[in-house]
Amino acid sequence: MTPLIPATGILTAVLFFLAATNGVKRYVKNGAIQWLARQHKVFGALAALSAITHMTIAVSQGELRITGTLAMLGVLTTAFLGGGFFQKGSRWLYIGHRIAGPLTALLIIGHIIFNSSY
């Protein structure tokens, strides 16, 4: 197994959880958290890109996992709903984005737990 698989997976998780700081900005009045929250769209887009890269490398190495597929679909769904909300301003896209985010966090954590044998 190439070391790129865990590296891109860690990058994806870090970027996803950095994007998630947007959800706590109203509760935490720390300057660093506020700055991170302002980068929400950038972190979310980079998380989606790195998830695609992570899965492409994993598939090319024969390391496809169902938990990873579900986590990647969650990241992409969250990103597309967030991007759609940014473009269209639809309340339903916003609600979907807010629901998909925490579910995706659980999918990522599950993927890490069940694939910690790397």
Image (tube, grey):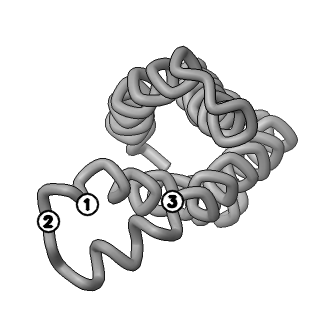
Q: Which residue corresponds to the image point at 82% horizontal and 43% vertical from the top-left?
A: 56
SS at circle 2: loop
SS at circle 3: helix
Mark 2 = which residue? 28
Q: Position of residue 61 (x, y in %)?
A: 80, 43
In this orientation, does residue 72 appear? no
The image's mark for residue 40 is 3
Give the amino acid at mark 1: Lys
Give residue 92's quadrant in the image.
top right
Q: CA distance from mark 2 to mark 3?
A: 15 Å
Q: Position of residue 78 (x, y in %)?
A: 57, 32
The image's mark for residue 25 is 1
Local crowd size for mark 1, using a 10 Å CA cut-off: few (<14), some (14–19), many (≥20)? some
Give the amino acid at mark 3: His
Left or right relative to 109: residue 13: right
- Whether pointer 2 and pointer 1 mark residues with C-beta atoms closer than 8 Å, the reply is yes
Local crowd size for mark 2, using a 10 Å CA cut-off: few (<14), some (14–19), many (≥20)? few
Q: Position of residue 83 (x, y in %)?
A: 69, 40
Q: CA distance from mark 2 to mark 1?
A: 5 Å
Q: Nearer the viewer, residue 28 or 112?
A: 28
Q: Is residue 80 above or below residue 39?
A: above
Give the amino acid at mark 2: Val
Q: Which residue corresponds to the image point at 39% horizontal and 55% vertical from the top-left?
A: 17
Give residue 58's quadrant in the image.
top right
